[in-house]
Amino acid sequence: MMHNIRQYQVPLHKYQAMMDLQERNERLFYKMLIENVEELLPIVYTPTVGEACQKYGSIFKNPQGLFISLKYKGKILEILKNWPQKKIQVIVVTDGERILGLGDLGCQGMGIPVGKLSLYTALGGIRPSACLPITIDVGTNNEKMLNDEFYIGLRQRRASGQEYAELMSEFMSAVKQNYGEKVLIQFEDFANHNAFDLLEKYRTTHLVFNDDIQGTASVVLAGLISALKLVGGSLADHRFLFLGAGEAGTGIAELIALEISKQTNAPLEEARKKVWLVDSKGLIVRSRLDSLQHFKKPWAHDHEPVNNFVDAIKTIRPTVLIGSSGAGQTFTKEVVETMSSFNEKPVILALSNPTSQSECTAEQAYTWSEGRAIFASGSPFDPVEYNGKIRVSGQANNAYIFPGFGLGLIISGAIRVHDDMLLAASEALAEQVTQEHFDNGLIYPPFSNIRKISAHIAAKVAAKAYELGLASRLPQPENLVAYAESCMYSPKYRSYR
């Protein structure tokens, strides 16, 4: 199978071959994915899954996952009961409004929950039968989709306001009624305004997790904790500047502030002052408070307005630059050179996905910083040779965190997600980076070892759940790492006598 997949030149064709295999022989699909994770991860997830979602209608063969349409309002529980598997542990749900950096793809966003859950199984060991991908189809505002003869969703403008809120409320109640309190619901690729509201609304009543806000934050914080070994100092000694103040940007900023606050015993408001954000209108400052969306308000600091990004870098003089804007090529030569002018080792994270939306490439970051940058990106880049030295950039990929995080919640029987669990996951991931990785300039461990890493993250998350009194699976196992590994699905063929 690997030989056959390698015959394809076009990544999308490889993706289609993998999806066909998943449909035909699930065990073999997972065996291949686990044993060739570094080669196949970019195929079954970013960046290829982005193109697959854009063309989902025209490559559509067999429906994967469960589609819940606005037309079935009032009957969602019935629809959930139609799903053949009854013991569901993880649901990944999207409404397709903000797929990666590609915008509103409507119903065709289904590629994301399907891809995420195949990683839950391959990297986190959750049984495939316990995973349920769901797309909530409330229409799309994407004209191209509405006029596409192959579009598979409702051909209408997106529902919003009360109609949308009622549908989501019915969905959340139906999930709890059908699968119980301990099913993990992961919100994926919702637009900013809905993402924050849904997380806020349901975090006290359901086991919910938003990968764009919380997963991204956790994986980036892990990278920053690792990067400190290369640049020195503690988190509180550094200044952080973000380009992009949406779900990812504010989510990462909040987790950094929480960790600084925890390490220094300073109030959270004080810790937030180390973190600055730039959105499409410039630096977020107090004089803009009245016009800011609620999730940006905590980041409005006392400072005169700065409209130009390079000017913001010169004024704030950050040691860490983080891109979460969804806009490609925004870390220009001038940006990287300015960062390098006052930092011996500038930390530059270009997190936007897929590769076409990345703020800069690995090659640009290393070349423009004269090989001094510590660089990681959201999508993978090939190693770069600069001045005779090979530099391997890390990938700040959520796949490091969410599979192990989900496994930790499941093995402890957690009933709620607490921010301290995200910090525990970050610390567990950072612990997996060895001196050898640092010597190569890496701030993340290689993916080839991901199942072991996931087991360690799961153990730390589960331990935190027990410590906070949020675990329901009692008594607590003595060795959580061994217990996590023993719970992981493995695609072996059993031998029968």
Image: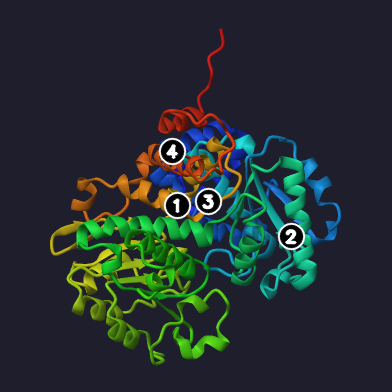
- Provide the residue designation for mark 4: 459
Marks 2/1: CA distance?
A: 31 Å
Q: Quadrant of residue 351?
A: bottom left
Residue at image mark 2? 168
| Residue where numbered disc 1 is placed | 42
Residue 405 to residue 54: above or below:
above
Label 3: element kind: helix
Above-or-below relation of 371 to 294: above
Q: Residue 13 has which mark?
A: 3
- Quarter of the image with the C terminus in it: top right
Query: Could you tell me which residue is drawn at 57 percent across and 87 percent down?
Result: 291
CB under 8 Å between callouts 4 and 3? no
Mark with earlier residue (3, 2): 3
Foreground mark, 1 or 4, reads: 4
Compare marks 2 and 1 and give the one earlier in the sequence.
1
Task: Tell me which numbered mark, 1 or 4, is placed earlier along the sequence.
Answer: 1
